Amino acid sequence: MRVIRFGLVGCGRIAKRHAELLGNGHIFGGLLAAVCDTDLSKAKQLGDKYKVGYYSDMHAMANNEELDVFVILTESGNHAHNTIELANYGKHIVVEKPMALTLSDADRMIQACEKFHVKLFVVKQNRFNLPIIKLRQAIEQQRFGKLVMGTVRVRWCRTNDYYSQAPWRGTWAMDGGVLANQASHHIDMLLWMMGDVQSVYALGATQLALIEAEDTAVASIRFYNGALGAIEATTATRPFDQEGSISILGENGIAEVGGFAMNQIRTWQFSKQDSDDDDVVSRYSTNPPDVYGYGHKSYYEHVIACLVGGGSNLIDGYSGRRSLELISAIYESIQIENSVSMRFTPSKSRLGF
């Protein structure tokens, strides 16, 4: 089997997880080949640990290393120009969430990758959590019947120590708040389960964190299929993380996937029982020890399967843009203090500016 060689662009906190998987041989068919960061000391630390080349310039890495995929792990506000600059090397690109901070940047990323025949993958690892796969199957099998409501809750703890670790965190230009950062996975999941959004009304506040953007937000959603939705997201939970969850209610059943990062089935009840329904909660109630979620390994295996076997990309640039559009609409609604209809052109959203 062909081995796919990955080069990391950005060596911050999340890069350690990506490097651990690729550098320690946990991804069959994948190999960590090089790393870079504008702070050379960070790149050297990872490079020395995994015995790969390290650089302070991504173009130097691209020109000196044999790579198949660039993995963009820089600040969210830098994802767009990093992706666009690297696309012309003709190598495929994995970019962390959110893919960009503005819809115009997301469009430019998609266009650049299409121009140079590059596959663009957005990191949405929670789609590969086993409980989420089970929930998606129930949606596809229409076990819920008419969808009534979908709800996501992010109750996490991020103190000022977290935000002060890097000056870009919590800023409008480079990061955004809990919606763009921590809750982006959950918003993607809500869309994946419930379908397209018709309109949204949201409120946001900065309650405890000393940052520009919000640390707490709520949003009410109307889907095109008639269902309603709710988003509750905060990093102001104290003193510890509580949950990252999604609930789906329909005329024929209810399911909740909770845990820290949508990794535990807590409720699974349907009017018409399947043979394995009684065992679902017990089988999917274990919390794997992984601070960033529980699907990164499967996510990388999916990327490799797409590149080697020609499989369909589950989370391409258009899918990443879809959740970014809802996030942008939520920020727009917070600013104008009114509902926002999709599709829309952002005018007041502060995200990315």
Image: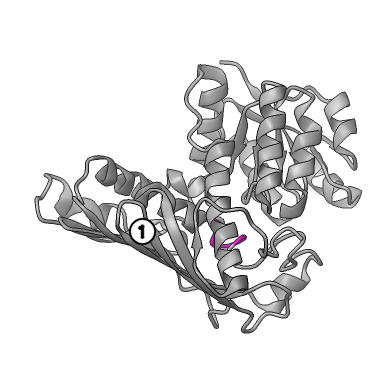
Query: Measuring 77% from the left and 35% from the top, which residue is drawn there?
Result: 84
Looking at the picture, how far across and down is residue 77, in whole percent?
75, 53
Can residue 167 be spotted in the picture? yes
Check disc 1 and report the residue beneath it.
Answer: 264
45 to 65, vertically: above or below: below
Task: Say left or right for 271 vs 50.
Answer: left
Query: Measuring 57% from the left and 79% from the top, which residue is drawn there?
Result: 236
Query: Measuring 69% from the left and 61% from the top, which residue is drawn there?
Result: 351
Number of numbered callouts drawn: 1
Neighbour tally class for label 1: few under 14, some 14-19, many 20 plus, Cα within 10 Å: many
Looking at the picture, how far across and down is residue 315, in whole percent?
52, 38
For the C terminus, the quadrant is bottom right
Which residues, given as a range, are shown in magenta? 180-184
Looking at the picture, how far across and down is residue 320, in whole percent?
56, 44
Which quadrant would residue 171 be assigned to in this image?
Answer: bottom right
Can residue 52 be spotted in the picture? no
Residue found farthest to the top:
1
For the N terminus, the quadrant is top right
Q: Amino acid at mark 1?
A: Gln
Would residue 294 be counted in the magenta stretch? no
Residue found farthest to the left:
272
In-front residue for pair 63/102: 102
Task: Say left or right for 8 vs 132.
Answer: right
What kind of colouring is applied to the model shown? one colour
In-front residue for pair 212/68: 212
Query: Measuring 74% from the left and 22% from the top, which residue is drawn there?
Result: 90
Secondary structure mostly seen in the magenta stretch: loop
In-front residue for pair 94/66: 94
144 to 4, vertically: above or below: below
Q: Secondary structure at mark 1?
A: strand
187 to 302, vertically: above or below: below
